[in-house]
Image (cartoon, coloured by chain):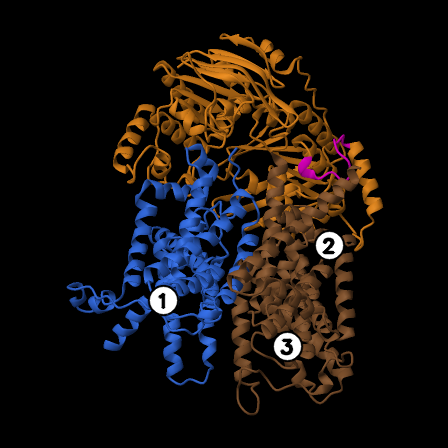
Amino acid sequence: MRVELKNIHKHFGAVHANNNVTLTVEGGSIHGLLGENGAGKSTLMKVLSGYIHADAGEISLDGGNVKRFKSPADALRHGVGMLHQDPLDFPPLTLLDNFILGCDANLLQPRTRAEKEFRELCQQFNFDLDTNAFVSDLTVGERQQLEIIRLLWLGARTLILDEPTTGISAPQKIKLFTTLRQLVAGGKSVIFVSHKLEDVEDLCHRVTVLRRGQVAGEATSPFVTEQLVQMMFGQQLNIGKRSNVELGAPVIEFDHLTLKDDRLTVPDVSLSVQAGEVIALAGLEGSGQQLFLQACAGLLPPSAGQLRVNGIDLTRKPYENFLRAGIAYMPADRMKEGLVPGLSIEEHIVLAKRGKKDALIDWGRACQTASEQIKEFNIKGIPPTRVEALSGGNQQRTLLALLPPDLKLLALEHPTRGLDIESTLYIWGKLLERRKQGAVIIFASADLDEVLQYSDRILVFFGGHVIETVKSSATNVEQLGYLIGGKKQL
Amino acid sequence: MTDTRNLFVRITTALAPLLVALIIAVLLLVATGAPPLDTFVKLFTGSFGTPSKQADTFVVWVSLAIVSAGLLITFIAGQWNIGVEGQIMMGSIFATWAARGVWEQQGIVGIPVIILWAMVGGAFWALLVAVLKIYGKVNEIFGGLGFNFIATAFNIYLIFGPWKQKTGGTLSGTEIFPEALWMPTLPELRVSPIAIIIALLVLVVIYFSLRGTLWGLQLKAIGKNIRAAFVLGVPTNPLLLSAYAVCGACAGLVGAFLVIIVHHRLIPSISSGYGFLGILIVLLSSVNALWLAPLALFFAAVSIGSTALQLELNIDSSLGGVLQGVLVLVVLLMQGIKEKVISK
Amino acid sequence: MEFFIAILASILSDSAPIIFASLGETLNERGGVINLSVEGTMLLSAMAGFAVAFTTDSLVLGFLAAMIVGAIVASLVAFGSITLKRDQVAVGFILTLVAGDLSSFLGVPFVRVPGPQIESLPIPFLRDIPFIGPVFFERDIITYLSFTLIIGMWLWFYKTQPGLQLRGIGERPEASFARGGNVKLMRYVYILLGGALIGFAGAAFSLHVKLGWSHRATAGFGWIALAIVIFGGWDPLKVAFGAYLFGALRASATTLQSSGLEVPVQVFPLLPFPLMILTLVIFNSRGLDRVLNYLPLGARRALTRLLRSNPPAALGTHFEQE
């Protein structure tokens, strides 16, 4: 199926997310859509898949013009299906329920027919899915597989995949790529949206690069990496070398720590981290990194073992002990767990202040402190600005501004998720400054490049276990990709 | 020029709901064959016509002002304290309990004891809901409703059981308190100036604590995002408990006033729906402490006025409740309509 | 034995209104909307149903009027929360107060007036089955309708395509929308249906169980219906079980009273609510988890699914359909 997007414009308030974008995908090909976070890729695909309406422009399928799709279901009826980064499925329902929900049927559920066709499709692509399992028990890779066969079952001839390789293991990625090549051999077309150069180079026949809402260029396979980078960023990237820092005394020690929550157990982790070290936690989503970070921060009491900070036993002690010991936590979902929507920057500064707090608030002083922090961290806002009005990058900077001056340990979840390259570099710059002052940084990230770039040591999590601890200088992206999928060797 | 235009818009948007509520009330009155104009006149004279009526209105105002001030605290903390009715009732029960203990005492000793013990009772009842919510994960709406039911049942049990009058259990309540334990009022009137002063004090204290204290800011953070507040270091559990305790204490205070100013005994349905009215007032105030006093006065006037309607025009007093509820509903819906129109 | 049958029969009949109310609210909440106006709706629809039935001397019109009243109140909840995006709890709470007061205000002429009532309607042949016959099939049309509703709703939820869609909307409206579901429309439809059922429940009181109208006649039952929905884990069969359990508790209260114990009468009908809460606390607590851990995996999974009540994930939230 041949897909053409012509002169698409889309605004979100003042942001011109898609600026005169024209794109052609030939039938039977895999077309990559490359660009860094915030370049406009997701927006464009949401327009194509009927999820949102463009402000201007046209969509053409196999030569026939469609002004706009009324809804995602309408798009699917025309043959365009989208697999979202977080698949839009129903976790509490079974796979079969998910499969048939939304299909064309009259009153009764077409269970028997659906089950048969489900199995046929699974066989065709060599997927191993159990119709009676609950979606909440599946990995992201398996949820993707379910969604792919569902879209195909409902007649998709063009599949859009939005950042599909984040959060799946290397073997799952290989399977996905095989599936996509199989689809395309049968005449379908695939649009592969990603910011990962390697995957795009490996898989796609043709690539369109977006930058700041506009088409920056196109290229055909075989690709020249420098050319793609140039189109993506507009310049050669200079990420800069990490300076070496002298490591100090152990700041945090984990002694046969066992962590538990309703779904996962992380057994027997032992680790000692010295001042100035940066530890990365790599692994698939839900492999235990979040539990580990929360334990570091004091938000999750360990069910066994000991946790010592600066020699003091803080196992199962209340959260405030951790705060007093100079530990801070920056969650992945900033607006859900890190900032309070409805409160202003200066109100956050008052709330986050550690140590002795006055019962009465001196608003004058709070405003002044807030202004100072805004200047220091280059936050685009003023003290009374409500945090929900800030952009993602500025929200992250605000969280940085709330960190205590005598920070000993910072536990970060996905520090730069969804941020553009400028904010990413700025934030890591600030984090590395703290490291120079002797702080320990422990962070979890799905971005293996980020993991390698900034860490001294990497803990690889799989199924709740730390299966490997490696020095970042001793490994590479490929090996890490296998490790997070549970394989120790190629 | 735009300033006056803004002012005009703000006044009309404030008055429009009142107008809509009035129209609905008129329709209802016409439907039941009652004279609309007479009704509204009676509503007004019934609450402000004579010094005696004014006093009665202020008596209700005291209760509504205090309970809504307390509810403001729990609302800011993001809690729906529907259990407030039960908390008022427990305040009355504890007040009666204390009264029975100081039956022979002078008012100067007895009344403060009664008031304080009532506040303890209200706070205790509220804390039960809070504990169930924090440690039992039971939604405070259902916890509150359940404890309302229990308080009601307990109240009836006391009135017909251990605290029944010497002549036998009756719906009119327990034994009447000795006059020494009646809150002193203005001569010939039912209003107590001390109670009014206390109510004003409560309003002022709550207003300032919400604006200028760390406690108030922390409650606000909890109300908007309890998880983020916790991660930032706010001690969420102690603060939630304190919010419920404060609201419960205010409710208990109202319970005490109901028993020593208004009824002078414990009766069934002692809480008189004031808790729920308090919730309506807080909703109407857009969670702004400055509006509580005037709104409470308006609601008090409607409540007293509607009893006059019953007595003099034979119109059921629940019309007052309808007016109050419709007003809040219209205000709420119009806010939504305004936002929808603006976003277009 | 006779006594036992009589008790069971009366529980089934007396519980019919609660069945309608709680199943109606289950529909609402499965769609993702908490309808806190149940208490007020039941009062108003009980009054309206009786008033219309009395004035027109037609039971059918009475029930119809009650259902319309229920749907109108529910539509206000829907309008306020879906279209205007106000807090569902706030809108429902205010409506409960307004509807309740309206029922008192408009119901004055009908207080303690004798009116029409539902007649008994035994089913031939089925009534002769030993034990089951006298219990289930010597009832009346309302009770039979309540049985049908329970089974019908179960079938709808788990065996039909639209029912599956309903479950989807309550869990993840974005995914429903992506699959062609008109989330707004469906929420409206289910709220109106649920409201109509709650209205029916009100009439079932004033025209069948607690005949006639008096000031705040059905007080408390609306709140209890809300509790039963939670107790029953938003599942039609479990909710029905909760409703019958509540009916049984009330029945035992009346028998205890007549057995001459010293406790005052008015206390008993109020007790079931706190009992529901107690069970909620126990069933959702960690203590239960620890007990369940001692069981073999199969039994544990089955029991967990039976006992745990997880609300529809999107309950109470707004949905932006761009």
Q: Amino acid at mark 2?
A: Gly
Q: Which residue is mark 2?
A: B216
Chain ID for label 1? C
Percent x, y of residue B41? 66, 65
Q: Quadrant of the N terminus of chain A?
A: top left
Frontmost of labels 2 and 1 is: 1
Say whether residue C134 is left or right of residue B94.
left
Q: CA distance from mark 2 to mark 1?
A: 51 Å
Q: Which residue is mark 3?
A: B94
Q: CA distance from mark 3 to mark 1?
A: 41 Å
**Is B316 a magenta residue?**
no
Q: Circle 2: is it few (<14), some (14-19), or many (20+) Cα within 10 Å?
A: many
Residue A380 visible at all:
yes
Which of the 4 quarters of the picture holds residue C123?
Answer: bottom left
Which of the 4 quarters of the picture holds residue C125?
Answer: bottom left
Say whether residue C98 is left or right of residue A347.
left
- Provide the secondary structure element on which disc 3 rests: helix
Residues in magenta?
A377-389
Viewer-proximal residue among A333 and B7? B7
Viewer-proximal residue among A235 and C17? C17
**Residue shown at the point (69%, 74%) measured from the top left:** B257
Q: Which chain is blue?
A: C
Colour chain A appears in:
orange
Q: What label sits on residue C105 in the rendered view?
A: none
Location of residue B50 with respect to A315 vertically, above or below = below
